[in-house]
């Protein structure tokens, strides 16, 4: 299956399970690189008696996974040089690129071993990987089901994240209400219940006989002026 998107179902599932520890970009690039050899054979540039050669073995999968790292870094630098911000892959550490690429190449070899008879001699030494009596369309349907499971997990994570934001907003609103109630408890009666104040006589009259010296110091009492005759 050169350059078919069916292999991406396994990568989507891995990304949905461990989104912070898996690079879907490296997974996709490794799946494209490993299918370069079948494409070259289909074009007649190499021996076309077999379609899947050394790259579709487990040692070849390790080599392709290692080559994915410089390919991803080259893609990043090229997009940065051309100022194509939307095409730049997300910045991920080297270990994540290598592990994601290895998952991509190994899963690619396993899925292709179930479909193509020319891979029998490469995987015959590994029990369970020899070609079984599975129609190719069922393998492709299996990959589509993996993508569906990935979508369900993603939607579940999204719903949980939105529910968490809702719970956090409710807690903030509740704490703000409590703080407002505590502050209102310290307010005077005419501020807490404005309707209870009927006449201005109920307001406390401030003592204006005390004055603060403009340069600080103790408050001094202002003597009332004597009435003039």
Image: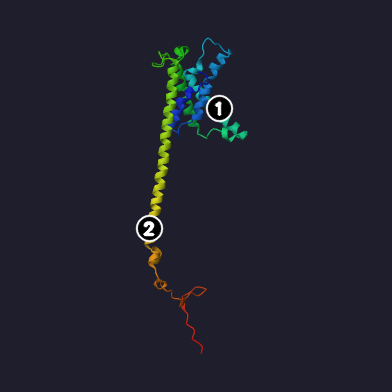
Q: Is residue 155 visible?
A: yes
Mark found first going from the N terminus, 1 or 2 = 1
Q: Please state which of residues 207 and 71 is positioned toward the viewer in this rendering.
A: 207
Q: Secondary structure at mark 1?
A: helix
Nearest to viewer (mark 1 / mark 2): 2
Q: Residue furthest top?
A: 49
Q: Secondary structure at mark 2?
A: helix
Q: Which mark is residue 176?
A: none
**Category of crowding for the residue at label 2, using alpha-carbon neighbours closer than 10 angstroms: few (below 14), some (14–19), many (at least 20):** few
Q: How is the image coloured?
A: rainbow
Q: Which mark is residue 71?
A: 1
Q: Please state which of residues 154 and 67 is positioned toward the viewer in this rendering.
A: 154
In the displayed structure image, the side of residue 13 where residue 34 appears, left or right: right
Do the numbered discs 1 and 2 sit on residues whose CB atoms are within 8 Å?
no
Q: Position of residue 158 (x, y in %)?
A: 43, 37
Q: Is residue 188 visible?
A: no
Compared to residue 115, the image places residue 15 above or below, namely: below
Compared to residue 220, the image places residue 114 above or below, namely: above
**Category of crowding for the residue at label 1, using alpha-carbon neighbours closer than 10 angstroms: few (below 14), some (14–19), many (at least 20):** some
Across the whole image, how many numbered discs are drawn on residues? 2
Q: Residue at x 51, y 28 (%)?
A: 26
Q: Position of residue 120 (x, y in %)?
A: 44, 12
Q: Position of residue 197 (x, y in %)?
A: 39, 68
Residue 41, image quadrant: top right
Q: Residue furthest right?
A: 82
Q: Position of residue 42 (x, y in %)?
A: 55, 14
Q: Which mark is residue 181?
A: 2
Inter-mark Cα distance, 1 to 2: 61 Å
């Amino acid at each position: 299956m050169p350059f078919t998107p069916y292999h991406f179902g396994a990568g989507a599932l891995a990304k949905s399970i461990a989104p912070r520890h898996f690079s879907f970009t490296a997974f996709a690039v490794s799946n494209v690189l490993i299918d370069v050899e079948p494409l070259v054979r289909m074009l007649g540039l190499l021996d076309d008696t077999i379609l899947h050669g050394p790259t579709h073995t487990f040692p070849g999968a390790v080599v392709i996974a290692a080559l994915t790292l410089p390919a991803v870094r080259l893609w990043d630098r090229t997009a940065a040089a051309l100022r194509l911000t939307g095409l730049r892959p997300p910045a991920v550490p080297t270990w994540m690129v290598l592990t994601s690429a290895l998952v991509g190449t190994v899963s690619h070899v396993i899925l292709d071993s179930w479909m193509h008879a020319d891979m029998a001699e490469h995987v015959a030494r590994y029990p369970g990987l020899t070609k079984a009596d599975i129609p190719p369309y069922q393998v492709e349907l299996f990959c589509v089901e993996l993508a569906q499971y990935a979508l369900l997990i993603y939607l579940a994570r999204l719903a949980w994240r939105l529910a968490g934001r809702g719970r956090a907003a409710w807690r903030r609103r509740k704490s703000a209400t409590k703080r407002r109630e505590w502050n209102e408890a310290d307010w005077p009666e005419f501020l807490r219940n404005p309707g209870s104040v009927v006449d201005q006589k109920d307001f406390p009259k401030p003592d204006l006989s005390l004055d603060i010296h403009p340069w600080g110091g103790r408050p001094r009492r202002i003597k009332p002026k004597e009435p003039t005759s």
